[in-house]
Amino acid sequence: MHIVVCIKQVPDPSQARIDRETGMVIREGVDKITNPFDLYALEEALRLKEAQGGKVTALSMGPPAAAEVLRDAIAMGVDHGVLLSARGFAGADTLATSYTLAQAIRRLADVHLIICGKQAADGDTAQVGPGLAANLDIPHITQVRKIAQITKESLQVERLTDTGYEAIEVNLPAVITVVKEINEPRLPGLRGMMRAKKAEIQVWGPEEIDADETRIGLKGSPTQVWRTFEPEIHRKGEMLTGTPSEQAAALWERLRAL
Amino acid sequence: MEIRVRTDDCTICGVCAQECPFGSISMGEVGPEFDESCTLCGVCVESCPAEAIYMVGEAEKILEERDSSKSRGVWVFAEQRAGHLQGVVLELLNEGKNIATQLGEPLACVLLGDEIEHLSQELIEYGVDQVYLAEAPELKDYRDDLYAQVLEHLVGKYQPTIFLIGGTTNGRSLAPRVATGLRTGLTADCTGFALDEAGNLLQTRPAFGGNLMATIRCPHHRPQMATVRPKVFEAPTRQPGRSGEEIRVELPPLKPWAHILEIVDEESLGPNLGEANVVVAGGRGLGSAEKFRLVEDLARAVGGAVGASRAVVDAGWVSYPHQVGQTGRTVAPKLYIACGISGAIQHLVGMQSAETIVAINRDPDAPIFSVATYGIVGEVEEIIPALIREIKSR
Ligand SMILES: Cc1cc2nc3c(=O)[nH]c(=O)nc-3n(C[C@H](O)[C@H](O)[C@H](O)COP(=O)(O)OP(=O)(O)OC[C@H]3O[C@@H](n4cnc5c(N)ncnc54)[C@H](O)[C@@H]3O)c2cc1C
Ligand SMILES: Nc1ncnc2c1ncn2[C@@H]1O[C@H](COP(=O)(O)O)[C@@H](O)[C@H]1O
């Protein structure tokens, strides 16, 4: 079984800061990490490989520095890393990103399952997984919390819904996006880290994946960021003081009046 | 391929003329002008600080021409479950109506399901002008495969200018599939809309876990698609007897690719978080899974649902469906009581539109107090039991 995991490098969300003057995200001095949600995707692929054999390829589109997250994936146990990196890919929205990833998966060939994170922590769109499947014209299932059964031909999963879950079966190949309930991601071991250091990361540009130039990067992106700004949060509140019982009494008096 | 300039974005700064490797650009009155020597290399596109220069391909040009002449209507996906419209659908109708009125276009809904015709009239009474109704036994419950195929077909046929979809779990799975099939733009999880002078939809959404707001446009593709965060907009009032048009649509040949084996609704603690009028939420300040029960006790006393910060969900004190915030639920109850929650921005974006917010926290500088209507600086172990006693004594 050949599983591809799509992983994205993102600025560490716990260090996110905004420049108040420009309303832009400050990228300098912020660590770059693997999108936290993608670690669950990696872990699930590794567990499937351990149970069933096969190989796992990690795929990422991003600047040359994104090779780092592919090395981290190899340290966890992934077999290969492929980086899609070229000037032409820059500025991609989710439509262009999912097209580009789809082209790379076509080139990888013989892929049975593609696993994405639930969403990327920088954009939070959760659009790339379904978009990727649409580009490849294969099924997708979002919010997978459990893989119940898998063969080379078909897959049964539980998908989290707003009110519970549903059990779904699809034929493979398919794309799934996974939520964090699905597993507990492992930490890289020493051997993995040694292997990652020496591993060769393949870098592909538009030619290698036979991309239509009008569908990648900025040119292939129908959406444009028009402006960014800091959210406003303000509410003039009343502080209730006194002993705990006085505070509780004062609060309940006000709430009862609502 | 062709180079184009959005002259209303262009600041005539001249950077493109400087950067052009072939000296093909001179600055005109409203923007750059290109001479014969232009090779369409795209350097100007990337250099433009205002992102006013862009390239279009042949396929796009054809789509643009087709779209601008024909596309009409603001559409809302009328997601129903078991014959009931989802709350977010009604919320979208208000916002959709505003946009449609400004554009001078009709507001329409697409309604998919089985034996759901009664919902058509309900939608019309909430302000919808046209309902595109597709009924079939296989459309009874939501499923990605068939719903996406039907929507792609209908959008292709009727060509709305705007298509809004509620940001439910299903909506956020369906919308990107459809947008990709139609090769148009999609903005996720919007919290605000406006129109620019050209009538393009300005779509505002939180990014970076709510630390930043971004306004997105999709000027050259139709429909302009967006998913919309539930509980952000208010539902319109119903006008009984209002009339509108119901259009029964013929289904295209459908190609199922999924087999739904089972649909399970899981019991949660008390009333459903998304729908509750009162939410009592607890954070790490509760200290332990045992003490988190205080929050459940208070919720029971006030008849509310239990919410939680991500920190306590991660710690396993309560299950994920209770998480409020950027990566959990968005709630907008009448009353939100935050106990031992610091008020990180990722939590605030999920609850700040609550009508009344109470914050109980030992740290007077906790950011949660900045959104609180009533604040209590104190220990949760003391305040919550005192409050429960107070409620029970009256
Ligand atoms: C990408 C991303 C997405 C996220 N999504 C979400 C999300 O959806 N929802 C969410 O909630 N968070 C989310 N977070 C996490 C968020 O940043 C915070 O870490 C989290 O909300 C903190 O939870 P907390 O307030 O319970 O804990 P803490 O920040 O640890 O706050 C505990 C508070 O309790 C107070 N306290 C302690 N003891 C007591 C006591 N005895 N009595 C009274 N008060 C006491 C403390 O003063 C403190 O203010 C996200 C983070 C990231 C990076
Ligand atoms: N540039 C990228 N490279 C590889 N995978 C990506 C990229 N962007 C998004 N993904 C995948 O798509 C998922 C959803 O991302 P998003 O739609 O951006 O929220 C992520 O968790 C990744 O698995």
Image (cartoon, coloured by chain):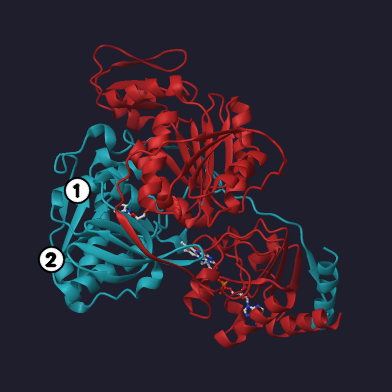
Chain colours: A cyan, B red
Protein chain holding label 1: A
- Residue located beneath label 2 in the image: A198
Mark nearest the camera among 1 and 2 is 1
Q: Are marks 1 and 2 in contact (CB under 8 Å)?
A: no
Q: Is residue B38 above or below residue A182?
A: above
Q: Position of residue A200 (x, y in %)?
A: 12, 59
In terms of sequence position, does the residue under pointer 1 or pointer 2 come before the other?
A: 1
- Residue located beneath label 1 in the image: A104
Quarter of the image where the N terminus of chain B is located: top left
Residue A123 shows in the view: no
Q: Quadrant of residue B238?
A: top right
Q: Amino acid at mark 1?
A: Ala
Q: Position of residue B67 (x, y in %)?
A: 41, 24
Residue at 32% across / 56% down in the picture? B258
* Quarter of the rendered structure image containing ligand 1: bottom right
Q: Amino acid at mark 2?
A: Lys
> Label 2: how many residues lie within 10 Å, few (<14), some (14-19) or many (20+)?
few
